[in-house]
Amino acid sequence: MRVLGIESSCDETGVAIFDSEQGLMADALFSQIDMHALYGGVVPELASRDHVKRLRPLVDQVMAESGCTPADIDAVAFTQGPGLIGALMTGACFARALAYGWNVPAIAVNHMEGHLLAPMLAPEKPEFPFVALLVSGGHTQLYSVEGVGQYELLGETLDDAAGEAFDKTAKLLGLPYPGGPHLAKLAEQGDATRFKFPRPMMDRPGVDFSFSGLKTAVRTAANQIEQITEQDKADICASFQEAMVDTLTRKCKRALKEAGMKRLVVSGGVSANIALRSRLQKTMAGMQGELYCPPLSYCTDNGAMIALAGWHRMQAGAQSQALGLVVKPRWPLKEA
Ligand code: KG4
Ligand code: ZN
C-alpha cells in the first residue's frame, strides 16, 4: 500500500510517499524559515500563503521522484491538527481535493502522532510498548505507548514547551530564528558549568515539566553581565542546554520507572539536539535499555512522518475523512 503524506501545520511544507513494503519512496520539504526569520518568528498568514504555493510543486516532485502515477497511490494522509489553523486548512483542502480527484481515502493524521511514530522511519524500529518523549516547538509530553492509538499521557509541560524555551532563550541572546539549532551550535563552544540554572519541577513527584522559570533564570543571568561577550553567550547557551538535557533525561528515567519499561522513544524538533540524544543514549545504555530517535532530518516537521502515520492509521481501520473540512488547531493525542 502506498500513502502520500502532506504536512502543513506550521512553517514547513512536507510531502512524501510511504510504501508499506519498500518504506519511504520519495520525500520533499520546503522550509519557510528564511521568510519568517525576518520577523523573528512564524507569521501565520504568511505561512498559509506560502503552503498554498508549495504544495502542488512538492506533490509533483515526489510523484516524479518515486515514478508513481495517481493510480499507484492508495491514500492521501494529511495533518489535521494541532497547528496553525490557516496553515492546516491549506494542507487539508489540498489533500482532500487530491484524494477526491484520485478516488482514494483522505486520512486525517494528528501531527503529534506523526512525530511519535517518526522513529519507525529509521532502520532500527522500536517495538511496542514504549515510553515516548515528544519534544517540539509546541509540545513537551511523556506518553506510555502500548500500540498505535493507545497513548496514555504521563506528564506534560505546564507552561512553555522545550523547543519554545530554546527559541525564547536564543531570541533573548540575539540569535537568529529558529533559536534551537543556533543555541545548540553556540553551546558547543561554551562552559556548561559556569551558570547553575534551575532544573524545574525535579523536587516534585510526577513527570510534568515547567520551563518558564528556566527562561527567567537565563534572562536574569544575562542582565547581570554588563557587556555581554560571545563567550558569555556561549556559556549561557551551554548551561541552559545542560539544564534542559538534565531535566528531560531525569524525567524520562522517572517515566520509564513509573511505566515499568526500558524502551524509550524521543521525537519532535528538539530530538535533533545532539547533546540530548547522546545523554539519553548513555542513560539508556546504563539501564540496559533501548533508545529510539528518528533520523535527524525527520525530527523536525516533515511529510514522511504523516505518510507513515496515515498508513498505521489505515491499518488500525481509519476511514476516509468526510468531504466537509475540519481542522483541529488543538487536538490532544488521546482523542486521536
Ligand atoms: O517538531 P518541530 O519541527 O515543530 C513543532 O511541531 O513544533 O519542532 C521545532 C522546534 C523548534 O522550537 C526548534 O528550535 C527546535 O524544535 N529544534 C531544536 C533543534 N532543532 C530544532 N532545539 C534544540 N536543538 C536542536 N538541534
Ligand atoms: Zn512538529
Image (tube, rainbow, N blue to C red):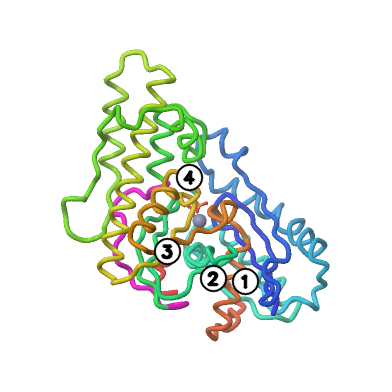
Beta carbon at label 2 within 8 Å of ligand 2? no
Per the image, the residue denoted by label 2 is: 109
Task: Specify the label residue 274 is tagged with.
Answer: 4
Label 4 Cα crowd, 10 Å radius (few <14 / some 14-19 / many 20+) = some
Report which residue position mark 3 lands on.
290
Circle 4 SS class:
helix
Q: Earlier in the sequence, mark 2 or mark 3?
A: 2
Which mark lies nearer to you, 4 or 3? 3
* Residue at 60% from the left image edge and 70% from the top image edge: 308
Report, in whole angstroms, how far the alpha carbon at label 2 lies from the one at label 3.
27 Å
Secondary structure of the residue carrying tag 2 is strand
Q: CA distance from mark 1 to mark 3?
A: 30 Å
Is residue 145 left or right of 302 when viewed as pictured? left
**Is-magenta flag for residue 151?**
yes
Task: Give left or right: position of 284 versus 113.
Answer: left
Which residues, given as a range, are shown in magenta? Answer: 147-163
Say whether residue 314 is left or right of residue 18.
left
Who comes first in sequence, dot 2 or dot 1? Answer: 1
The answer to whether 179 is drawn above or below residue 67 in the figure is: above
Dividing the picture into quarters, in which one does residue 260 lie? bottom left
Which badge, 4 or 2, is on the more N-terminal residue? 2
Q: Amino acid at mark 2?
A: Val
- Give the residue pinned by disc 1: 77
Question: Would you say the beta carbon of the disc 4 residue lies within 8 angstroms of ligand 1?
Answer: yes
CA–CA distance in space, label 2 to label 1: 7 Å
Q: Percent x, y for residue 274?
A: 48, 45
The residue lying toward the viewer, choosing from 78 and 247, is: 247
Q: Residues within 10 Å of mark 3 (few under 14, many from 20)?
A: some
Q: Are dots 2 and 1 in contact, CB under 8 Å?
A: yes
Question: Quadrant location of residue 95?
Answer: bottom right
